[in-house]
Image (cartoon, helix red, strand yellow):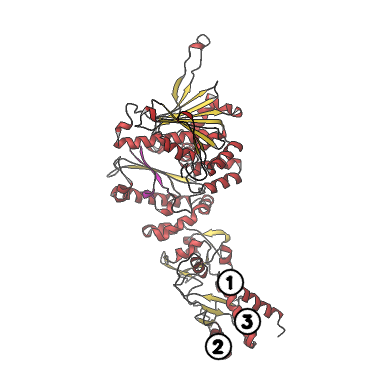
Amino acid sequence: MSDTDSDASVAECPQGREQHSFQTEAKQLLHLMVHSLYSNREIFLRELISNAADACDKLRFLAVSDAALLGEDTELRICISVDAEAKTITISDNGIGMNHDEVIANIGTIARSGTREFLQQLQDSKNDQRAELIGQFGVGFYSAFIVADEVTVETRHAGADAGAAVRWQSAGEGEYTLEPISREQRGTDVIIKLKDDAEEFLQEYRLRSIIQRYSGHISFPVQLLTTPPADDDDAEKQTPEWQTINDTTALWTRPKTDISDEEYIDFYKSIGNDSAAPLTWTHNHVEGAQSYKLLLFVPGQAPYDMMFNRDERQGLKLYVQRVLIMDAAEQLLPNYLRFVRGVVDSADLPLNVSREILQENDLLQKIRSAVVKRSLTMLEKLSADADKYQQFWKHFGTVLKEGIVEDMGNRDAIAKLLRFPSTRTGLDGSTSLNEYIENMAEGQDTIWYVTADNLKAAAGSPHLEWFREQGIEVLLLGDRIDEWLMGYWFEFDGKSLKSIAKGKLDTGAEEEPEAADKAVLERLHKLLEDRVESVTSSARLKQSVACLVLDENAMAMHMQQLLQQAGQDVPSSKPGLEVNLQHPLWQRLQSAQEQQFEDLGWLLYEQAVLSGGGQLDDPAAFVQRTNRLLTSTD
């Protein structure tokens, strides 16, 4: 999206100065930033330092193939200074910088999917949640307006002439100006004129504490212009000097024994744009035929716009000898582990590696394999803490299930990490497959489950009645992914996985129906032959009157209808109808005549459809039949 869109305007001002209107969603965002009160306004500095570090990272990467971009100024850094008299803070970097069009694209518009959802979340969330949302949605620059009356950006792209620099300026009220300027050094200055109620950020100790808290592990020096303590005799002789505030040693390169939990947590927050601590982490140094370092984290909560969007670009930060190569290297993680955060630093990959090379690189495939195994081992260790693992499963369990289908090589390891409610644990509990096997009845060789559109529907399935009577545990699968998952997964630890709603159930108590019942079953089948393959007596039903039983390879009804609604072709297959011959409605059906038999027969079928999670083709006809039966005096 650019400034030429229908909701943006541009006007020429004297001497090359341009006046622009923000894109509509940017206006809404600015309004929220300016007029909402935040409990932790300090996050603006975290965001701007992160942006500056990204600019330095990009230049360092590009300079690998074009050293002229660095020139003589080879020490990349971020500098912060204040002018108490002018009430300004300046955040400077000598990174890649921007040209005219990049300023418009990066600051004048928000060309990012999910922005509307972000705005809604920002409006609905509490103050202490908003800083987290800002980081998640990548709109950190705009956080400057939390504390600013006016923001000025002066920038020059690396390799461009001094006269190609640009000044961007806005008071955050829906418009901004652009004008060409001359700038000797490359990079960007963000100059914030503070509001009257934000003058605390002019204090050196306040800035120092914020930098150390949020940006202590930035891999570039973050320097603060400080004034040394003055002696009484020569106070006027003290001159400001640049002091590096952060520790530029990359955390992942240090021995684990030298790193505290607090340092790990702070580092995770800085790379994960998260205000909450991670649930767990693993830190490994691999030496030998190939050398690399891994630092992986499991977040404590799911980012808003990532978990269920498989197309969202995500992954680990990939470094080569501490040079950032990719901010989100998708090749290092399979999709089902897309919640894992962290860094991989290789000593062997080439610095000029590209995405295409990564896809074909054998070394990277070995690193990917190690990342997967370390991640699964990390989760296995986490599962020993029931409370923490329940928190993990709540946020990421549905995503982890994808691995059963996508990663055959690690299927057993993934399966051990899965958790399901069951008829033993109830809807609020969960069990692992290993626990299920431990609780199996003597002689049982099958892991039984039932799928439905939601957990309550699964727990209410009529197919459970015989299993409950026998005390056989059944897994309750209520995620929409579950039916897809079980279509590819048939065995665990030598035990077969079977749906209680598919195929013939051998209860050992089947009896041949009497001649009178058999005649009514045949009559009912003739009535419903367009909808069902067969009508038979049921040994699995104890309280319900009827249920639909699918072929072992058929898709559950709720999933069939979901795919049909999405316009997909679903193979047609008719289910069987099982009827409880001990139910009062069956007794009534035996003596019913003509219209009443037809109404009762269809009602049995429609009840079975509804209890199986399906939808009726003709709800109005169902209502009419029910009303006729309710008002019948026969």
Q: Specify which label sits upstream in the sequence, 2 or 3.
A: 2
Q: Are marks 3 and 1 in contact (CB under 8 Å)?
A: no
**Mark 1 or 2, nearer chain start:** 2
Kindly report which numbered mark, 2 or 3, lies closer to the viewer in this rendering.
Answer: 3
Q: Which residue is mark 1?
A: 610
Label 2 secondary element: helix
Q: Which residue is mark 3?
A: 599
The residue identified by callout 2 is 518
Which percent across, then down, holds residue 427? 58, 61
| Residue 135 inside the magenta-drawn segment | no
Nearer to us: label 1 or label 2: 1
Q: Secondary structure at mark 1?
A: helix
Residue 254 visible to the viewer: no
Judged left or right of residue 598, residue 508 is left
**Amino acid type at mark 2:** Lys
Q: Is residue 321 magenta?
A: yes
Q: Which mark is residue 235?
A: none
Marks 2/3: CA–CA distance: 19 Å
Are the two marked residues, 1 and 2, in contact with CB atoms closer than 8 angstroms? no
User: Residue 587 occupies which quadrant of the picture?
Assistant: bottom right
Coordinates of residue 215 in the picture (x, y in percent): 47, 34
- The spot of residue 297 in percent (x, y) is 45, 45
Q: Amino acid at mark 1?
A: Leu
Q: Residue at x 34, y 28 (%)?
A: 74
The stretch in magenta equals 313-333
